[in-house]
Image: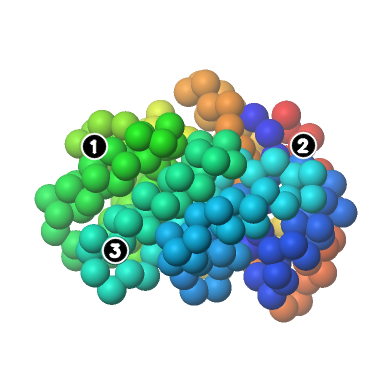
């Protein structure tokens, strides 16, 4: 395992400045956001000019890009898949394997979600990439059992485990170790049952236990810090504290 951080930890900075800040804080690995709204690079931009996107995403200030977070807002279904395919080509060109995507919203027909995920996995596999479906409150993966069933039904599908959603969300601290056999990426912050994000050290995330559980499933990938700024906290200090905490466990 190794420590990484999301560029989303500095949402108000352009990509170049966010990467420079992470490097200054002694992070060496980064997850970059490819979000149509509020991201570093828009999926529509990737589809429109792949070479430009590759050049932009290679300028990483000595950081190694270990994942892309993809959120597409396309007007038509086929355009959605076209933009996703372009993001997969970007991943291959920049030697990134893990692609984080969101699951369908609650109420999405199960079979429709299965078909969507199968198509995403097929597109990603053609470019040697993995799809890591995010575990997230308000989405189909907010229940760990459903997250596992989705993976059972879509060959090659993996999960991006965000434990905060299983501590703070409707699951409220119930067990979720069974999702770890499918986990290809991990997002971390500190959380309580009452508040999604709190200052580092004030929450209920048992980082050491989490690392031990992941070791049982031979997890060797990123422990990725994903902490947007809190109004009452010094973001640089919080990011440094989290890096030191995670590195102490490895």
Cβ–Cβ below 8 Å for labels 3 and 1?
no
Residue 135 visible: no
Distance of label 3 from label 1 (alpha carbons): 22 Å
Q: What is the total number of numbered labels drawn onto the structure image?
A: 3
Label 1 element class: loop
Cβ–Cβ below 8 Å for labels 2 and 3?
no
* Of 235 and 168, the residue lying toward us: 235
Residue 232 visible: yes
Q: Looking at the rendered structure, which numbered label has been put on residue 94?
A: none
What residue is rendered at 41% in x and 36% in y? 127
Distance of label 2 from label 3 (alpha carbons): 41 Å
**91 to the left or right of 84:** right
**224 to the left or right of 70:** right
What residue is rendered at 69% in x and 64% in y? 15
Q: Position of residue 250 (x, y in %)?
A: 73, 29
Q: Looking at the rendered structure, which numbered label has been put on residue 247?
A: 2
The residue tagged 3 is: 79
Please tell me whether mark 2 or mark 3 is closer to you in this view: 3
Q: Position of residue 20 (x, y in %)?
A: 81, 58
The residue tagged 1 is: 154
Residue 124 lies in quadrant: top left
Q: Residues within 10 Å of mark 2 (few under 14, many from 20)?
A: few
Label 2 element class: helix
């Amino acid at each position: 395992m190794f420590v990484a951080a999301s560029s989303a930890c500095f949402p108000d900075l352009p990509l170049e400045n966010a990467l420079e800040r992470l490097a200054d804080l002694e992070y060496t690995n980064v997850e970059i956001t490819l979000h149509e709204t509020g991201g570093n690079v828009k999926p529509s931009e990737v589809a429109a000019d792949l070479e430009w996107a590759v050049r932009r995403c290679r300028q990483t200030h000595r950081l190694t890009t270990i994942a892309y977070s993809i959120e597409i807002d396309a007007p038509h279904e086929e355009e959605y898949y076209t933009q996703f395919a372009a993001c997969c080509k970007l991943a291959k060109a920049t030697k990134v394997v893990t692609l984080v995507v969101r699951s369908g919203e609650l109420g999405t027909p199960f079979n429709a979600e299965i078909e969507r995920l199968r198509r995403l996995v097929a597109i990603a596999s053609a470019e040697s990439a993995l799809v890591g479906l995010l575990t997230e409150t308000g989405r189909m993966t907010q229940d760990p059992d459903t997250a596992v069933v989705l993976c059972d039904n879509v060959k090659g599908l993996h999960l991006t485990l965000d434990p905060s959603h299983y501590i703070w969300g409707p699951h409220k601290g119930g067990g979720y170790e069974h999702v770890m056999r499918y986990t290809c990426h991990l997002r971390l912050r500190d959380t309580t049952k009452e508040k999604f994000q709190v200052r580092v050290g004030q929450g209920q995330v048992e980082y050491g236990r989490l690392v031990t559980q992941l070791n049982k499933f031979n997890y060797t990938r990123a422990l990725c810090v994903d902490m947007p700024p809190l109004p009452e906290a010094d973001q640089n200090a919080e990011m440094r504290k989290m890096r030191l905490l995670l590195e102490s466990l490895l």
